[in-house]
Image: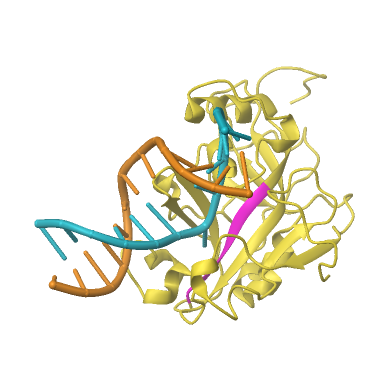
Chain colours: A yellow, B cyan, C orange
DNA sequence: GCAAAGATTTGCT
DNA sequence: GCAAATCTTTGCC
């Protein structure tokens, strides 16, 4: 395909105009198979990608800038704390799979399953910085909100429920292999020409029910200085 | 079978 | 800063 700037639509078939774009690579499943805290850090800067619903539209791409780790049955903040249930079953399976749940009866949250089966763990994608497909993200947000979305472009994915809304993610996405380049919803590696993000670690958000030490463990990771974080980062956050 | 609570977001005071 | 919106999942009777 030799389409010029703003040029034609991609051809049908499995080749996703691979030659026209800067080389993108799938996010390696190996990075998700080991320690979940390492996996969480590795996901900062990676891309969340959703293919366009129709030819001629831009795919949605978000740079992951905020995540949280939920690790094992002993983590009282994790959905795995009550053992395997119908809802959390996928957490006990292989890494790289999507786990999506509904929270507060209205918001969906996307997790990436980590660690080898049968260890239950996952990383919650809390915020992304829009990179491409911004119009599609806003349109999806407005469908969910059933009204105008006043947020700035940089804030379209600035929270776990907002990531799901902007990317049309719901529980039907549970089980999708996010490391499969053929998946409509997937992860891609940080572009090679982008520097390593500076990462800060803080306590996780919204888990006061879990008690200590789970409330305080620094298992939330953010890309320092991103305009798309769900919340402000404490000044003394660890690296 | 029923009650309670939740890995959130938004808008109003 | 606080409360409402909204419904699934889980725990207990």
Query: Could you tell me which residue is drawn at 58 percent across and 20 percent down?
Result: A148
Q: Position of residue A115 (x, y in %)?
A: 56, 74
Quarter of the picture holding the N terminus of chain A = top right
Q: In the rendered image, is residue A188 in sight?
A: yes
Q: Position of residue A146 (x, y in %)?
A: 48, 24
Q: Judge by depth and name the residue closer to the eye, A45 or A217.
A: A217
Instruction: Check if residue A123 falls in the magenta segment.
Output: yes
Query: Could you tell me which residue is drawn at 69 percent across and 42 percent down?
Result: A62
Q: Judge by depth and name the residue closer to the eye, A140 or A97.
A: A140
For this view, does A219 lie left or right of residue A3? Answer: left
Q: Position of residue A206 (x, y in %)?
A: 56, 60
Quarter of the picture holding the C terminus of chain A = bottom right
Q: What secondary structure prevails in the magenta region?
A: strand
Query: Could you tell me which residue is drawn at 73 percent across and 64 percent down?
Result: A42
What's drawn in magenta, residue-wise? A120-127
Measured along the vertical axis of the image, is residue A204 above or below residue A157? Answer: below
Instruction: Check if residue A126 falls in the magenta segment.
Output: yes
Query: Could you tell me which residue is drawn at 74 percent across and 47 percent down?
Result: A24
- Place residue A80 in its image quadrant: bottom left
For this view, does A102 lie left or right of residue A136? Answer: left
- Place residue A3 in its image quadrant: top right
Q: Judge by depth and name the residue closer to the eye, A91 or A227.
A: A227
Measured along the vertical axis of the image, is residue A174 above or below residue A201? Answer: above
Measured along the vertical axis of the image, is residue A168 above or below residue A56? Answer: below
């Amino acid at each position: 395909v030799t389409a010029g700037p703003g040029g034609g639509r991609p051809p049908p078939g499995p080749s996703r105009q691979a030659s026209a774009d800067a080389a993108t690579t799938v996010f390696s499943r190996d990075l998700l198979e080991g320690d979940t805290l390492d996996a969480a850090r590795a996901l900062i800067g990676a891309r969340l990608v959703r293919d366009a619903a129709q030819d001629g539209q831009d795919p949605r791409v978000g740079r992951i800038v905020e995540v949280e780790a939920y690790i094992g049955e002993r983590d009282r903040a994790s959905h795995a704390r009550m053992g395997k249930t119908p809802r959390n079953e996928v957490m006990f399976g292989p890494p790289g799979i999507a786990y999506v749940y509904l929270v507060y009866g209205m918001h969906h949250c996307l997790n990436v399953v980590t660690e080898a089966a049968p260890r239950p763990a996952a990383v919650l994608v809390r915020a992304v910085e829009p990179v491409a497909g911004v119009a599609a993200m806003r349109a999806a947000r407005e469908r969910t909100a059933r009204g105008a979305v006043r947020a700035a472009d940089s804030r379209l994915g600035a929270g776990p429920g907002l990531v799901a809304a902007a990317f049309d993610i719901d529980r039907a996405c549970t089980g999708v292999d996010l490391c499969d380049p053929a998946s409509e919803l997937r992860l891609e590696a940080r572009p090679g020409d982008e520097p390593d993000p500076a990462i800060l670690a803080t306590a996780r958000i919204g888990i006061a029910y879990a008690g200590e030490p789970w409330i305080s463990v620094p298992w939330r990771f953010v890309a320092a200085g991103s305009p798309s974080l769900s919340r402000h980062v404490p000044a003394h956050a660890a690296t």
